[in-house]
Image (cartoon, grey):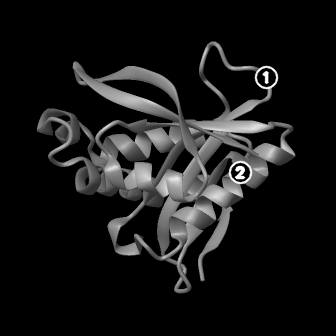
Amino acid sequence: MTLVRPATLDDAGDLARIHVDTWRTTYTGLIPQVVLAAMTLDRAVERWQAVLPLHTPHHCLLAEDPAGDATGFVRCGPSRDEEASGTTGEIQALYVQSTSWSTGTGRALLKAAEKELLADGFTEATSWVLAGNDRARRFYQRCGWRTDGGTKQEQREGVALDEVRYRHTL
């Protein structure tokens, strides 16, 4: 059984480890190595230590396995899309370490984030997914999310990464 709880500043190391590890596991072969090499654990810890205090407590959630080991996280909040209405929330990041894939961890995190967004007054949510990340795309589709035609390019280390937008009514 997966426990999902608000992340605290003390979790910055676990969040950084999961973030870096999942990028390297999931995106190898999908994005250039220069982008993956730029993601270091030290830089990720510093980033999480800086951004965690900016989130309300339930906008960054950590998943733990029965032994208490951190296995994934989700970050949510208002949509960052310029054209989004005030009732649109966003799953800004959702990562589960590969050893916890297909265990229900991702679904538990997504459902917890949807619940938090709904409690904040949002009626729908979006999430941007790397276009070539078929595993994540199938996950969102199994959870009832659908593409809405939105696309964008995100720049990382001078590399353009194509993303597609998924949408879900809360």
Q: Amino acid at mark 1?
A: Gly
* Image location of residue 59, percent across then percent down: 68, 46
* Image location of residue 19, percent across then percent down: 39, 51
Label 2: few (<14), some or many (≥20) within 10 Å? many
Looking at the image, residue 41 lies above or below residue 154:
below
Question: Which residue is rendered at x = 85% and y = 47% of the image?
Answer: 119
Q: Is residue 111 left or right of residue 24?
A: right
Q: Can residue 158 be seen here?
A: yes
Question: Which residue is rendered at x = 25% and y = 47% of the image?
Answer: 27
Disc 1, SS:
loop
Q: Earlier in the sequence, mark 1 or mark 2?
A: 1
Q: How many numbered tags mark residues here? A: 2
> Residue 161's mark?
none
Q: Amino acid at mark 2?
A: Glu
Q: Is residue 55 left or right of residue 127?
A: right
**Where is residue 95, by image quadrant?**
bottom left
Q: Can residue 7 be seen here?
A: no
Q: Residue furthest top?
A: 82
Q: Is residue 76 left or right of residue 152?
A: right
Relative to the observer, which residue lies in front, 13 or 114?
114
For label 2, the residue is 114
> Residue 86's mark?
1
Looking at the image, residue 119 lies above or below residue 8:
above
Q: Is residue 94 left or right of residue 56?
A: left
* Image location of residue 135, percent across then percent down: 36, 55
Disc 2, SS:
helix
Label 1: few (<14), some or many (≥20) within 10 Å? few
Question: Which residue is rendered at x = 52% and y = 86% of the image?
Answer: 67
Cα distance in 3D space between marks 1 and 2: 16 Å
